[in-house]
Image (spheres, rainbow, N blue to C red):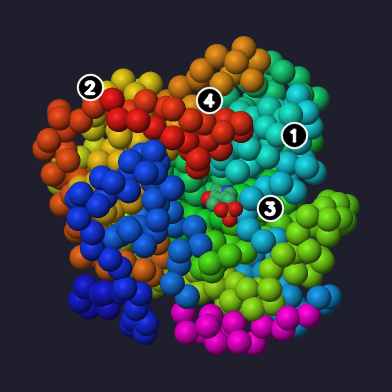
Amino acid sequence: MRFQTAEPFRIKMIEHVKKTTFEQRAEWLKEAQYNVFRVKAENVYIDCLTDSGTSAMSKNQWAALMMGDESYASCDSFFRLEQSVHQTYGMPLVQPVHQGRAADYLLAKIYTQPGKIAIGNMHFDTFRGNAEVLGALVEDLVFDEGKDAASPASPFKGNMDIAKCEKLIAEKGIDQISVIILTVTCNNNGGQPVSMQNIKDVAALARNHNIPFVMDIARIAENAYFIKTREDGYYDVDIVDIVKEQLSYCETAVMSAKKDGLVNIGGLFLTRNQHIFAKANQLAIVHEGFITYGGLAGRDMDALAVGIKEACDFDYLQYRVGQVEYLGNQLKEKGIPIIEPPGGHGIYVDARRFFPHIPQHDFPAQRLVVALYQESGIRAVELGACAFGGKDPITGEATWPQLETMRIAISRRVYTNDHLDCIVNALDYIYQNRDSYKGLKLVFEGPIVSLRHFTAGFELL
Ligand SMILES: *Cc1c(COP(=O)(O)O)cnc(C)c1O
């Protein structure tokens, strides 16, 4: 188009949000032990806790919902979902599950073994938690720059470091490695993309060593957009073809459909391998539901069948990724330190640079999350000392992650740029007054350390 364009949709229905006072929020934070997962959503003005299951559905998805066929075995809805997966992802064997972590469970059960290592660029916490419960070991082998929130901008910070991977395999021995998993985009380090070249290189490495290669494709369409706009040779290739090419290199893929499926619930376990499919079917029957619904209602599968396709629309992706970039650029203008360049689904504020006077064991990123909610009613999430820190599985000693960030996740098709401006204003205010904030003390954590951030409790220092 000749002129600047706006959202590629009109708003058909709205949801009211509540404005609250500073004093009310102080009370609610105290009740929630300074963990915003425990703050009631109705008391949140702009919710950037997650982009998971928070998308606005289109009228075509709502219409599809009414088509849902609620039968147990071999319902029409499943076949529509299967066809959409075939057409968009090109993966032949489709096991629906109720959400991404259920697919992670199947993946961990089928592809990991106790004491053996699952290699990833950066494993997402629900896979990590499932693997940990089953006694498997995990390694994150993203490039060093991907683990450093202050590293200069570069186009594919989600890439796996192939040399590190080869070194680990040589050191530990091939029989100690169970699986290699690439997460695209890489959620934990900023929604940073993985290049097609890196996907090919990882696939080749896995093939050479006879290690199964799996992809976590929660944000496969956003990753395709980055490949199209940043990687040589892809500018003229359609998003759907880039999506299919990415998947063509893996044996199996797991997906939280709550991201690039543009639905509020759902997940997929996809494979090319009949033998793996049979195992996934068995586990799904025990844990999820029959093989043609996997814990989903027919209507959920119909909404997903449509959402998978809508997420691969170029205009949608340009708006989507552009909106996240808009927020990143506004924050940068205020001098607020973020992971650069902005990723696909949110902005990650670097709490090390934001609150340099708060040591990591006093949870600077969590402190920032608390400050943002307290000042403005805006809810973000910590991805730092609480979410990624833990205990060494062998020595039991506390471990502290390199990344100490606050993620501002942007829901798909939900907020306007005016909402994003509110976030900028609130963070600008906190940044100007940053010296007045002290850290937090962790006073409660659950038994699975890699999942402690969901239920942890804190006190203000
Ligand atoms: C959200 C997410 C999951 C888990 O999915 P749920 O649907 O929340 O259970 C797994 N992997 C990645 C990369 C995710 O972003």
- Density class for disc 2 (Cα within 10 Å; few <14, some 14-19, many ≥20) is some
* Residue at 50% in and 42% down: 454
Which residues fall within the magenta stretch? 58-71
Q: Quadrant of the C terminus?
A: top left
**Three-letter code for the amino acid on which mark 3 is drawn:** Ala
What residue does disc 2 label? 357
Q: Earlier in the sequence, mark 2 or mark 1?
A: 1
Position of residue 327 relative to residue 90, above or below, is above
Name the spot of residue 450 as percent of width and height, x first: 56, 33
Provide the secondary structure element on which disc 4 rests: strand
Provide the secondary structure element on which disc 1 rests: loop
Position of residue 118 relative to residue 219, above or below, is above
What residue does disc 3 label? 102
Q: Residue 335 carries which label?
A: none
What residue does disc 4 label? 390
How many angstroms separate mark 3 from mark 1 (CA)? 14 Å
**Three-letter code for the amino acid on which mark 4 is drawn:** Gly
Q: Left or right: where does residue 300 sit relative to residue 189?
A: right
The secondary structure making up most of the magenta span is helix
- Asked if the beta carbon under badge 3 is closer than 8 A to the nearest atom of ligand 1, the reply is yes
Q: Residue 134 carries which label?
A: 1
